Image: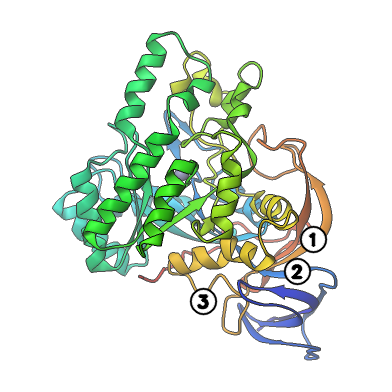
């Protein structure tokens, strides 16, 4: 069994912060202490650096078809980029298209990942049609470690479920222990606004944002939580972007309801102003929900600090400007929705969150690793540095800076939403189940070495 000793680093978990050494045997952490002296196949000196649990990104869309195009990163390029950025686990979305079984969807996405993923992965199952048979399949998938499901209140005719189906799915998780994740935007209202804008000749990218009001997200978030409350089950709101939606989550949590929500770096660092960039550049930021008013950023940071928001994921769903985003040159509603982010999460949140004093180091680890691991049934195998946990470890240099740009990052997409932005706090070395997969910034892992993670129920 190969052994690895990480010396002299500052170990950071969601609760602890101390100088220490970590000893890894095979795929697991076995010993933590000070001044460990056991012989190891390799010793890494982490002096002056943080030793963090590997990042967990529970919202990615690799190799995902959308509107006649496919997201630019597949499971190979996407997970390699993730590793460069200190993420060692992704939970991606497998889509049930109408007329298909959940199992068919699951197998399709398992094939996409197999032999390609360089880090461990799991799946949430997107349900777009709910029948009695699909409800039974939910139980079977939970038993196989696919313990969360995503439903849409937006995209009528494609992904959207009606309230009755949503309620039935929620009730079902009360029996099988799964968790429902919700895309909360009022799809009916948005559809009407989109049609109206197009009829008025408003075709530029900014109209994507102007036809998806913050209140449409607030309303759907409220409804999603109310449906979960009536079903007596928890709910997890994905990619929360609007202050109106955050208020609904906060109100529910104040009442003691198990309502959870994530936000994403794009909503913390970018804003509606980006849609006003010249020419067609606003298309870079076309994603759903859209970027919001700049003032919202402070509200979201506060939500993260005070635990009204529990996780930061990326919603990584890259489409190139060339040939992909361009599909919507004459009609914003045809711009593929999504942006790249799988690689830049830790550096952005460290730089903009920890260095500014908005988040403690512990909270940074909790939001990017521990809390998503707990919510989605991966803890304590993932999400912490502890004896017995998988040796998914990031050595993070808090003093090194880098300039973000499409050319130097590893995501397979021809632009970056943070192009030119300088961040301090960079992933240096990364271990996935005890193997060094990023060594001083160079990828040394292997496509296909990631394994499917069977996740636990609540
Ligand atoms: Zn998404």
Q: Is residue 449 visible?
A: no
How far apart marks 1 and 2 lie (CA) works out to 7 Å
Q: Are marks 3 and 1 in contact (CB under 8 Å)?
A: no
Splitting the image into 4 quarters, where does residue 278 fall? top right
Q: Looking at the image, which is closer to me, 421 or 244?
A: 244
x then y, percent, for residue 312: 55, 54
- Residue 50 is tagged as 2
- The first of marks 3 and 2 along the sequence is 2
Q: Quadrant of the C terminus?
A: bottom left
Q: How is the image coloured?
A: rainbow
x then y, percent, for residue 356: 74, 53
Q: Is residue 152 visible?
A: yes
User: Residue placed farthest to the left in the image?
Assistant: 132
- Residue 398 is tagged as 1
x then y, percent, for residue 189: 32, 28
Splitting the image into 4 quarters, where does residue 316 fall? top right
How far apart marks 3 and 2 lie (CA) works out to 20 Å
> Which residue in the structure is indicated by mark 3?
380
How far apart marks 3 and 1 lie (CA) works out to 25 Å
- The first of marks 1 and 2 along the sequence is 2
- The first of marks 3 and 1 along the sequence is 3
Q: What residue is at 37 percent from the left and 43 percent from the top? A: 184
Q: Are marks 1 and 2 in contact (CB under 8 Å)?
A: yes
């Amino acid at each position: 069994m190969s052994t690895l000793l990480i010396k002299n680093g500052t170990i950071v978990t969601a609760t602890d912060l101390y100088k220490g050494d970590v000893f890894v045997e095979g795929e697991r952490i076995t010993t933590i202490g000070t001044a460990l002296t056991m012989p190891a196949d390799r010793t890494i000196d982490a002096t002056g650096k943080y030793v963090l649990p590997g990042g967990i990104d529970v919202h990615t869309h690799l190799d995902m078809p959308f509107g006649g195009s496919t997201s630019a990163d597949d499971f190979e390029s996407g997970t390699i980029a993730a590793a460069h950025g200190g993420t060692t686990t992704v939970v991606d979305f497998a889509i049930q298209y109408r007329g298909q079984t959940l199992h068919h969807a699951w197998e399709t996405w398992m094939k996409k990942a197999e032999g390609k993923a360089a880090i461990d992965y799991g799946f949430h199952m997107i349900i777009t049609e709910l029948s009695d048979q699909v409800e039974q399949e939910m139980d079977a998938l939970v038993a196989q470690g696919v313990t969360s499901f995503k439903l849409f209140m937006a995209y009528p005719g494609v992904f959207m479920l009606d309230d009755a189906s949503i309620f039935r799915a929620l009730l079902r998780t009360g029996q099988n222990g799964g968790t429902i994740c919700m895309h909360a935007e009022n799809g009916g209202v948005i559809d009407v606004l989109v049609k109206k804008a197009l009829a008025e000749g408003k075709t530029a990218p900014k109209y994507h944002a102007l036809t998806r009001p913050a209140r449409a997200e607030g309303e759907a978030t409220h409804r999603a939580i109310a449906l979960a409350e009536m079903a007596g089950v928890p709910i997890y709101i994905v990619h929360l972007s609007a202050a109106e939606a955050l208020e609904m989550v906060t109100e529910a949590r104040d009442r003691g309801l198990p309502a959870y929500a994530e936000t994403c770096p794009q909503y913390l660092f970018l804003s509606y102003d980006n849609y006003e960039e010249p020419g067609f550049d606003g298309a870079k930021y076309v994603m759903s929900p859209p970027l919001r008013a700049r003032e919202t950023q402070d509200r979201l940071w506060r939500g993260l600090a005070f635990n009204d928001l529990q996780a930061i994921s990326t919603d990584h769903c890259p489409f190139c400007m060339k040939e992909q985003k361009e599909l919507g040159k004459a009609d914003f509603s045809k711009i593929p929705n999504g942006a790249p982010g799988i690689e830049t999460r830790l550096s952005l949140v460290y730089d903009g969150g920890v260095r500014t004093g908005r988040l403690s180091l512990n909270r940074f680890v909790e939001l990017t690793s521990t809390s998503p691991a707990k919510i989605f049934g991966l803890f304590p195998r993932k999400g912490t540095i502890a004896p017995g946990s998988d040796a998914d470890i990031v050595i993070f240099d808090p003093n090194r800076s880098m300039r973000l740009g499409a050319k130097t990052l590893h995501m397979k997409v021809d632009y970056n939403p943070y192009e030119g932005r300088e961040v301090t706090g960079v992933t240096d070395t990364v271990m996935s189940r005890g193997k060094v997969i990023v060594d001083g910034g160079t990828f040394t892992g292997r496509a296909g070495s990631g394994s499917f993670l069977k996740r636990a129920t609540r």
